[in-house]
Amino acid sequence: MSTLGAVAATGGMRFSIDPWDPSYGTSVADDGFKESTAKIEAGVEEAPSAWRPVPLPAARGRLVAAPDAVLFVDGVRREDARGWIDDLAPADTRATSAAPAVCASFASGVVCSCALGAHLLTARVERGLFTPARHAGDITTLAGTYRVRPVTDDGPNGLNLAIQQAMTTLEISIAAGARHGHATVPGADGQVWPGPDGVAGSAPDDSFADGPAWPSDAEAQPVPGDPFAAGPTGPWPRQRLAEHPTDQPGGAAPDRSALLIVDGPLRGRTHMPRTLGFIKTHHSRYLEPPQHEVVGRLQPGERTPVFMMGTNWDRFTWYLRLPSRPGAPWAGVARIECPASLPAADAIGLADLSQVVLPRFASHEFKDGRAPQNLYPIAGLERALRRRLGDRQLMYRSLRRAAGGAIG
Ligand SMILES: [Zn+2]
Protein backbone atom coordinates (compact mmCIF):
# COMPACT_ATOMS: atom_id res chain seq x y z
CA MET A 1 0.00 0.00 0.00
CA SER A 2 2.98 2.26 0.29
CA THR A 3 2.84 2.86 -3.44
CA LEU A 4 -0.32 4.87 -3.00
CA GLY A 5 1.45 8.04 -2.04
CA ALA A 6 -1.56 10.20 -1.42
CA VAL A 7 -3.08 7.50 0.73
CA ALA A 8 -0.21 7.33 3.17
CA ALA A 9 -1.17 10.69 4.62
CA THR A 10 -4.49 9.31 5.72
CA GLY A 11 -3.27 6.15 7.33
CA GLY A 12 -2.55 3.99 4.32
CA MET A 13 -6.04 3.37 3.12
CA ARG A 14 -8.34 4.33 0.33
CA PHE A 15 -11.70 5.64 1.31
CA SER A 16 -14.61 7.37 -0.28
CA ILE A 17 -17.53 9.40 1.01
CA ASP A 18 -21.08 8.78 -0.10
CA PRO A 19 -23.11 11.73 -1.37
CA TRP A 20 -25.64 11.00 1.33
CA ASP A 21 -27.05 13.30 3.90
CA PRO A 22 -27.10 11.72 7.35
CA SER A 23 -29.58 13.00 9.87
CA TYR A 24 -28.48 15.81 12.08
CA GLY A 25 -27.63 15.43 15.74
CA THR A 26 -29.34 12.24 16.72
CA SER A 27 -29.82 12.13 20.44
CA VAL A 28 -29.35 9.01 22.52
CA ALA A 29 -32.61 9.30 24.30
CA ASP A 30 -33.89 5.97 23.06
CA ASP A 31 -34.31 3.50 25.89
CA GLY A 32 -33.45 0.61 23.62
CA PHE A 33 -35.92 -1.92 25.04
CA LYS A 34 -37.94 -3.67 22.38
CA GLU A 35 -38.90 -6.94 23.98
CA SER A 36 -40.98 -7.69 27.00
CA THR A 37 -39.34 -10.90 28.15
CA ALA A 38 -37.99 -9.10 31.21
CA LYS A 39 -38.20 -10.88 34.52
CA ILE A 40 -40.20 -8.76 36.94
CA GLU A 41 -40.16 -8.95 40.72
CA ALA A 42 -43.02 -6.65 41.70
CA GLY A 43 -42.86 -7.21 45.46
CA VAL A 44 -39.80 -5.12 46.33
CA GLU A 45 -41.68 -2.34 48.13
CA GLU A 46 -45.25 -3.56 48.23
CA ALA A 47 -46.82 -6.95 47.77
CA PRO A 48 -48.06 -7.06 44.18
CA SER A 49 -51.64 -7.39 45.39
CA ALA A 50 -51.22 -4.19 47.44
CA TRP A 51 -49.92 -2.01 44.59
CA ARG A 52 -51.43 1.45 44.44
CA PRO A 53 -50.07 4.88 43.53
CA VAL A 54 -47.43 6.05 46.03
CA PRO A 55 -48.15 9.65 47.13
CA LEU A 56 -45.48 12.30 47.53
CA PRO A 57 -43.16 11.56 50.47
CA ALA A 58 -44.44 14.52 52.48
CA ALA A 59 -47.96 13.14 52.25
CA ARG A 60 -46.62 9.94 53.78
CA GLY A 61 -44.79 11.73 56.60
CA ARG A 62 -41.41 11.06 55.03
CA LEU A 63 -38.73 13.72 55.01
CA VAL A 64 -36.57 13.78 51.92
CA ALA A 65 -33.38 15.83 51.91
CA ALA A 66 -33.05 17.66 48.62
CA PRO A 67 -29.60 17.21 47.09
CA ASP A 68 -27.25 20.17 46.91
CA ALA A 69 -26.98 19.71 43.20
CA VAL A 70 -28.59 17.70 40.44
CA LEU A 71 -26.28 16.73 37.60
CA PHE A 72 -27.71 15.76 34.23
CA VAL A 73 -25.62 13.69 31.86
CA ASP A 74 -26.39 13.24 28.21
CA GLY A 75 -24.79 12.72 24.86
CA VAL A 76 -25.53 13.44 21.23
CA ARG A 77 -24.12 11.89 18.12
CA ARG A 78 -24.20 12.65 14.47
CA GLU A 79 -23.11 10.83 11.37
CA ASP A 80 -21.04 13.31 9.40
CA ALA A 81 -20.57 11.01 6.41
CA ARG A 82 -20.84 7.43 5.30
CA GLY A 83 -18.38 5.83 3.01
CA TRP A 84 -16.25 2.85 2.17
CA ILE A 85 -12.76 1.69 3.02
CA ASP A 86 -11.31 -0.14 0.03
CA ASP A 87 -9.83 -3.51 0.75
CA LEU A 88 -6.08 -3.67 0.27
CA ALA A 89 -5.11 -4.30 -3.33
CA PRO A 90 -1.80 -4.90 -5.11
CA ALA A 91 0.03 -1.84 -6.36
CA ASP A 92 -1.50 -0.03 -9.32
CA THR A 93 -4.75 -1.96 -9.11
CA ARG A 94 -8.09 -0.93 -7.76
CA ALA A 95 -9.62 -2.87 -4.91
CA THR A 96 -12.63 -4.90 -5.94
CA SER A 97 -14.26 -4.85 -2.54
CA ALA A 98 -14.64 -2.44 0.34
CA ALA A 99 -15.86 -2.26 3.91
CA PRO A 100 -18.49 0.21 5.08
CA ALA A 101 -17.40 3.12 7.23
CA VAL A 102 -19.11 5.89 9.12
CA CYS A 103 -17.48 9.13 10.14
CA ALA A 104 -19.30 10.30 13.24
CA SER A 105 -19.02 13.14 15.70
CA PHE A 106 -20.31 12.65 19.20
CA ALA A 107 -20.34 14.65 22.39
CA SER A 108 -21.22 14.19 26.01
CA GLY A 109 -21.65 16.71 28.74
CA VAL A 110 -22.95 17.42 32.19
CA VAL A 111 -25.18 20.27 33.27
CA CYS A 112 -25.48 21.08 36.94
CA SER A 113 -28.48 22.58 38.63
CA CYS A 114 -27.59 23.93 42.04
CA ALA A 115 -27.85 27.08 44.10
CA LEU A 116 -25.89 28.82 41.37
CA GLY A 117 -28.54 28.08 38.80
CA ALA A 118 -28.15 25.76 35.85
CA HIS A 119 -24.71 25.71 34.33
CA LEU A 120 -22.73 23.54 32.00
CA LEU A 121 -20.09 21.68 33.99
CA THR A 122 -18.27 19.97 31.20
CA ALA A 123 -18.60 18.96 27.58
CA ARG A 124 -16.41 16.93 25.30
CA VAL A 125 -16.49 16.26 21.59
CA GLU A 126 -14.89 13.28 19.88
CA ARG A 127 -14.86 12.16 16.27
CA GLY A 128 -14.49 8.63 15.06
CA LEU A 129 -14.08 6.57 11.91
CA PHE A 130 -16.15 3.47 12.58
CA THR A 131 -15.42 0.55 10.31
CA PRO A 132 -14.69 -3.16 10.37
CA ALA A 133 -11.79 -2.59 7.92
CA ARG A 134 -8.76 -3.75 9.87
CA HIS A 135 -6.27 -1.65 7.96
CA ALA A 136 -8.18 1.58 8.48
CA GLY A 137 -6.33 4.53 9.96
CA ASP A 138 -7.29 7.93 11.28
CA ILE A 139 -8.71 10.44 8.82
CA THR A 140 -7.27 13.89 9.35
CA THR A 141 -9.26 16.73 7.89
CA LEU A 142 -8.88 20.46 8.17
CA ALA A 143 -11.87 20.48 10.51
CA GLY A 144 -10.79 17.68 12.82
CA THR A 145 -9.43 14.17 13.06
CA TYR A 146 -11.62 11.08 12.89
CA ARG A 147 -9.80 8.49 14.95
CA VAL A 148 -10.30 4.96 13.77
CA ARG A 149 -12.62 2.87 15.93
CA PRO A 150 -12.48 -0.79 15.01
CA VAL A 151 -15.91 -2.41 14.74
CA THR A 152 -16.07 -6.14 15.31
CA ASP A 153 -19.82 -6.58 14.79
CA ASP A 154 -20.24 -6.65 11.02
CA GLY A 155 -24.01 -7.13 11.24
CA PRO A 156 -26.37 -4.62 9.63
CA ASN A 157 -26.52 -2.51 12.79
CA GLY A 158 -22.90 -3.01 13.86
CA LEU A 159 -21.68 0.48 12.96
CA ASN A 160 -24.62 2.14 14.64
CA LEU A 161 -24.16 0.13 17.82
CA ALA A 162 -20.45 0.93 17.85
CA ILE A 163 -21.15 4.66 17.65
CA GLN A 164 -23.66 4.41 20.45
CA GLN A 165 -21.23 2.40 22.55
CA ALA A 166 -18.46 4.94 22.01
CA MET A 167 -20.78 7.71 23.11
CA THR A 168 -21.89 5.79 26.19
CA THR A 169 -18.26 5.23 27.12
CA LEU A 170 -17.62 8.94 26.77
CA GLU A 171 -20.67 9.68 28.92
CA ILE A 172 -19.46 7.37 31.65
CA SER A 173 -16.03 8.92 31.82
CA ILE A 174 -17.35 12.45 31.67
CA ALA A 175 -19.99 11.79 34.33
CA ALA A 176 -17.47 10.32 36.73
CA GLY A 177 -15.15 13.26 36.18
CA ALA A 178 -17.93 15.80 36.58
CA ARG A 179 -19.06 14.45 39.91
CA HIS A 180 -15.53 14.65 41.17
CA GLY A 181 -14.80 17.95 39.51
CA HIS A 182 -18.01 19.71 40.43
CA ALA A 183 -16.25 21.58 43.20
CA THR A 184 -12.58 21.04 42.78
CA VAL A 185 -11.08 21.50 39.35
CA PRO A 186 -10.43 24.55 37.24
CA GLY A 187 -12.91 24.53 34.44
CA ALA A 188 -15.75 23.75 36.78
CA ASP A 189 -16.08 27.44 37.41
CA GLY A 190 -18.13 28.25 34.37
CA GLN A 191 -15.44 30.13 32.51
CA VAL A 192 -13.38 27.74 30.45
CA TRP A 193 -15.08 25.06 28.46
CA PRO A 194 -13.54 22.67 26.03
CA GLY A 195 -14.57 23.55 22.53
CA PRO A 196 -14.79 21.22 19.56
CA ASP A 197 -12.12 18.56 19.69
CA GLY A 198 -11.29 19.47 23.25
CA VAL A 199 -9.76 22.84 22.48
CA ALA A 200 -10.33 25.03 25.49
CA GLY A 201 -11.38 28.60 25.30
CA SER A 202 -14.46 28.68 23.14
CA ALA A 203 -17.22 30.97 24.25
CA PRO A 204 -19.52 29.59 26.90
CA ASP A 205 -23.11 28.92 25.98
CA ASP A 206 -25.56 31.59 26.84
CA SER A 207 -28.20 28.92 27.03
CA PHE A 208 -27.23 27.87 30.53
CA ALA A 209 -27.24 31.29 32.11
CA ASP A 210 -29.80 32.22 34.69
CA GLY A 211 -31.10 28.79 35.46
CA PRO A 212 -33.70 28.17 38.10
CA ALA A 213 -32.73 28.70 41.71
CA TRP A 214 -31.85 25.51 43.50
CA PRO A 215 -32.61 24.29 46.03
CA SER A 216 -35.90 25.90 46.67
CA ASP A 217 -38.22 24.99 49.47
CA ALA A 218 -41.18 26.32 47.60
CA GLU A 219 -43.54 23.87 46.03
CA ALA A 220 -42.57 22.85 42.55
CA GLN A 221 -43.42 25.94 40.56
CA PRO A 222 -43.45 26.27 36.83
CA VAL A 223 -40.22 27.98 35.84
CA PRO A 224 -41.10 31.21 34.07
CA GLY A 225 -39.68 31.06 30.62
CA ASP A 226 -37.17 28.58 29.36
CA PRO A 227 -33.83 29.33 31.00
CA PHE A 228 -32.15 27.40 28.22
CA ALA A 229 -33.69 29.37 25.42
CA ALA A 230 -31.20 30.24 22.75
CA GLY A 231 -29.75 33.70 22.67
CA PRO A 232 -28.08 35.86 25.24
CA THR A 233 -30.21 35.74 28.33
CA GLY A 234 -27.86 37.04 30.96
CA PRO A 235 -24.46 36.72 32.48
CA TRP A 236 -22.80 33.36 32.59
CA PRO A 237 -22.56 32.19 36.19
CA ARG A 238 -19.03 32.92 37.29
CA GLN A 239 -19.04 31.40 40.69
CA ARG A 240 -15.97 31.08 42.81
CA LEU A 241 -15.00 27.55 43.63
CA ALA A 242 -15.26 28.26 47.33
CA GLU A 243 -18.88 29.19 46.86
CA HIS A 244 -19.73 26.15 44.90
CA PRO A 245 -21.53 23.37 46.73
CA THR A 246 -19.24 20.56 47.64
CA ASP A 247 -20.06 17.03 46.83
CA GLN A 248 -19.21 15.35 50.09
CA PRO A 249 -21.55 12.83 51.63
CA GLY A 250 -21.95 14.26 55.10
CA GLY A 251 -21.51 11.70 57.86
CA ALA A 252 -24.70 11.02 59.76
CA ALA A 253 -26.44 14.03 58.24
CA PRO A 254 -28.94 13.33 55.47
CA ASP A 255 -27.23 12.62 52.19
CA ARG A 256 -27.41 15.83 50.19
CA SER A 257 -24.66 14.87 47.79
CA ALA A 258 -25.26 15.49 44.13
CA LEU A 259 -27.82 13.35 42.39
CA LEU A 260 -26.82 12.31 38.89
CA ILE A 261 -29.51 11.87 36.23
CA VAL A 262 -28.60 9.89 33.14
CA ASP A 263 -30.84 10.35 30.13
CA GLY A 264 -31.72 6.79 29.22
CA PRO A 265 -31.20 3.44 30.86
CA LEU A 266 -28.45 2.85 33.40
CA ARG A 267 -27.05 -0.10 31.51
CA GLY A 268 -23.27 -0.05 31.82
CA ARG A 269 -23.43 2.78 34.35
CA THR A 270 -24.74 0.97 37.40
CA HIS A 271 -21.48 1.46 39.29
CA MET A 272 -21.95 5.22 39.62
CA PRO A 273 -23.19 6.37 43.06
CA ARG A 274 -26.41 8.36 43.51
CA THR A 275 -27.29 7.90 39.86
CA LEU A 276 -30.69 7.46 38.27
CA GLY A 277 -31.52 6.42 34.74
CA PHE A 278 -34.39 8.41 33.25
CA ILE A 279 -36.42 6.73 30.51
CA LYS A 280 -39.02 8.85 28.81
CA THR A 281 -40.28 6.52 26.12
CA HIS A 282 -41.96 3.21 26.73
CA HIS A 283 -41.73 0.45 24.17
CA SER A 284 -42.69 -2.49 26.33
CA ARG A 285 -45.25 -3.48 28.84
CA TYR A 286 -43.32 -5.01 31.70
CA LEU A 287 -45.89 -5.36 34.46
CA GLU A 288 -48.76 -7.76 34.88
CA PRO A 289 -52.15 -6.14 34.20
CA PRO A 290 -53.06 -5.40 37.86
CA GLN A 291 -49.77 -3.52 38.41
CA HIS A 292 -49.64 -2.05 34.91
CA GLU A 293 -53.03 -0.50 35.55
CA VAL A 294 -51.61 1.40 38.56
CA VAL A 295 -49.36 3.38 36.21
CA GLY A 296 -52.38 4.81 34.43
CA ARG A 297 -53.86 5.93 37.74
CA LEU A 298 -50.82 7.93 38.91
CA GLN A 299 -51.43 11.57 39.71
CA PRO A 300 -48.65 14.09 39.00
CA GLY A 301 -45.80 13.50 41.45
CA GLU A 302 -47.01 10.03 42.33
CA ARG A 303 -45.05 6.91 41.52
CA THR A 304 -45.54 3.19 41.47
CA PRO A 305 -43.92 1.00 44.10
CA VAL A 306 -40.33 0.05 43.30
CA PHE A 307 -39.93 -3.20 41.42
CA MET A 308 -37.02 -5.22 40.10
CA MET A 309 -36.54 -5.74 36.40
CA GLY A 310 -34.13 -8.20 34.84
CA THR A 311 -33.28 -8.30 31.16
CA ASN A 312 -29.66 -9.01 30.36
CA TRP A 313 -28.95 -6.90 33.43
CA ASP A 314 -30.88 -6.10 36.61
CA ARG A 315 -32.09 -2.85 38.10
CA PHE A 316 -34.62 -1.42 40.49
CA THR A 317 -37.18 0.65 38.65
CA TRP A 318 -40.44 2.55 39.10
CA TYR A 319 -42.80 4.72 37.11
CA LEU A 320 -43.29 8.38 38.00
CA ARG A 321 -45.81 10.81 36.58
CA LEU A 322 -44.44 14.29 36.00
CA PRO A 323 -46.66 17.35 36.19
CA SER A 324 -48.69 17.33 33.00
CA ARG A 325 -52.06 18.17 31.69
CA PRO A 326 -54.59 15.41 31.94
CA GLY A 327 -54.30 13.40 28.78
CA ALA A 328 -53.61 9.87 27.68
CA PRO A 329 -53.25 7.37 30.54
CA TRP A 330 -49.45 7.42 30.23
CA ALA A 331 -49.05 11.14 29.54
CA GLY A 332 -46.12 12.48 31.51
CA VAL A 333 -45.02 9.06 32.73
CA ALA A 334 -41.31 8.35 32.99
CA ARG A 335 -39.56 5.23 34.19
CA ILE A 336 -36.67 5.65 36.59
CA GLU A 337 -33.89 3.15 37.26
CA CYS A 338 -31.29 2.66 39.96
CA PRO A 339 -28.72 -0.08 40.47
CA ALA A 340 -29.85 -3.52 41.59
CA SER A 341 -26.77 -3.70 43.81
CA LEU A 342 -28.31 -1.21 46.25
CA PRO A 343 -30.16 -2.36 49.35
CA ALA A 344 -33.89 -2.23 48.60
CA ALA A 345 -34.34 0.47 51.26
CA ASP A 346 -31.87 2.70 49.44
CA ALA A 347 -33.64 2.13 46.14
CA ILE A 348 -36.94 3.12 47.79
CA GLY A 349 -35.20 6.21 49.21
CA LEU A 350 -34.06 7.17 45.71
CA ALA A 351 -37.58 6.62 44.42
CA ASP A 352 -38.87 9.04 47.05
CA LEU A 353 -36.12 11.50 46.12
CA SER A 354 -37.09 11.27 42.45
CA GLN A 355 -40.62 12.37 43.34
CA VAL A 356 -39.26 15.50 44.99
CA VAL A 357 -36.55 16.34 42.46
CA LEU A 358 -37.63 15.39 38.95
CA PRO A 359 -40.98 17.22 38.71
CA ARG A 360 -39.08 20.49 39.13
CA PHE A 361 -37.34 19.89 35.84
CA ALA A 362 -40.29 18.82 33.75
CA SER A 363 -40.51 20.80 30.54
CA HIS A 364 -43.67 22.56 29.52
CA GLU A 365 -45.95 21.61 26.73
CA PHE A 366 -45.80 24.91 24.95
CA LYS A 367 -42.01 24.82 24.88
CA ASP A 368 -41.30 21.26 23.96
CA GLY A 369 -43.16 18.71 21.89
CA ARG A 370 -41.86 15.98 24.15
CA ALA A 371 -43.00 17.69 27.35
CA PRO A 372 -43.01 17.02 30.16
CA GLN A 373 -40.68 14.03 30.01
CA ASN A 374 -37.99 15.90 28.12
CA LEU A 375 -36.42 17.41 31.23
CA TYR A 376 -35.38 20.91 30.30
CA PRO A 377 -31.79 20.71 31.62
CA ILE A 378 -31.33 17.74 29.31
CA ALA A 379 -32.94 19.55 26.40
CA GLY A 380 -30.62 22.52 26.98
CA LEU A 381 -27.63 20.23 27.29
CA GLU A 382 -28.43 18.53 23.99
CA ARG A 383 -28.64 21.87 22.24
CA ALA A 384 -25.29 22.94 23.71
CA LEU A 385 -23.69 19.65 22.69
CA ARG A 386 -25.01 19.81 19.14
CA ARG A 387 -23.48 23.22 18.73
CA ARG A 388 -20.18 21.76 19.83
CA LEU A 389 -20.28 19.06 17.18
CA GLY A 390 -19.41 21.78 14.71
CA ASP A 391 -20.99 22.53 11.39
CA ARG A 392 -21.90 19.30 9.68
CA GLN A 393 -21.59 20.67 6.16
CA LEU A 394 -18.08 21.83 6.98
CA MET A 395 -17.16 18.43 8.38
CA TYR A 396 -18.69 16.72 5.38
CA ARG A 397 -16.83 18.90 2.88
CA SER A 398 -13.59 18.36 4.78
CA LEU A 399 -14.10 14.62 4.59
CA ARG A 400 -14.85 14.78 0.88
CA ARG A 401 -11.70 16.78 0.38
CA ALA A 402 -9.65 14.30 2.42
CA ALA A 403 -11.10 11.39 0.47
CA GLY A 404 -10.44 13.11 -2.82
CA GLY A 405 -6.86 13.66 -1.80
CA ALA A 406 -6.45 10.07 -0.80
CA ILE A 407 -7.78 8.71 -4.03
CA GLY A 408 -5.99 11.25 -6.12
ZN1 LIG B 1 -23.40 23.54 40.32
Image (spheres, rainbow, N blue to C red):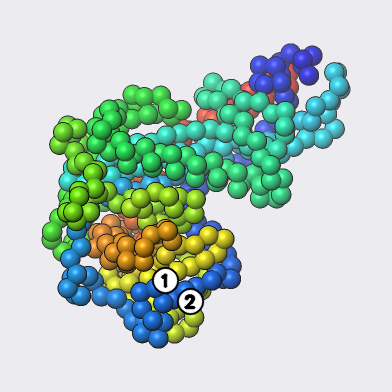
Residue found at the far front of this picture? 252
Left or right of 228? Residue 218 is left
Q: Residues within 10 Å of mark 2 (few under 14, many from 20)?
A: some
Callout 1: SS: strand
Horizontal placement of 364 versus 2: left or right?
Answer: left
**Horizontal and vertical percent position of residue 71:** 31, 47
Q: Is residue 374 above or below residue 122?
A: below
**Quadrant including the C terminus:** top right
Q: Using a 10 Å C-alpha cutoff, classify the residue at mark 1 as few (fewer than 14 neighbours), some (14 to 19) or many (20 or more).
A: many
Query: Which badge, 2 or 1, comes first in the chain's sequence?
Result: 2
Q: In which quadrant is the N terminus drawn?
A: top right
Determine which residue is flagged by label 2: 287
Residue 245 seen: yes
Q: Position of residue 172 (x, y in %)?
A: 44, 43
Nearest the viewer among 331 and 316 is 316
What residue sits 79% from the left and 14% below the top? 3
User: Mark 2: which amino acid?
Assistant: Leu
Q: Is residue 314 above or below residue 1?
A: below
Looking at the image, can residue 206 be seen? no
Examine the image and state in which quarter residue 219 appears. Answer: bottom left
Q: Secondary structure at mark 2?
A: loop
Residue type pointed to by label 1: Phe
**Residue 176: x %, y % from top left:** 38, 41
Q: Residue at x 71, y 21 (%)?
A: 12
Drawn side of residue 396 relative to residue 225, left or right: right
Residue 17, placed above or below residue 354: above
Residue on which disc 1 sits: 307
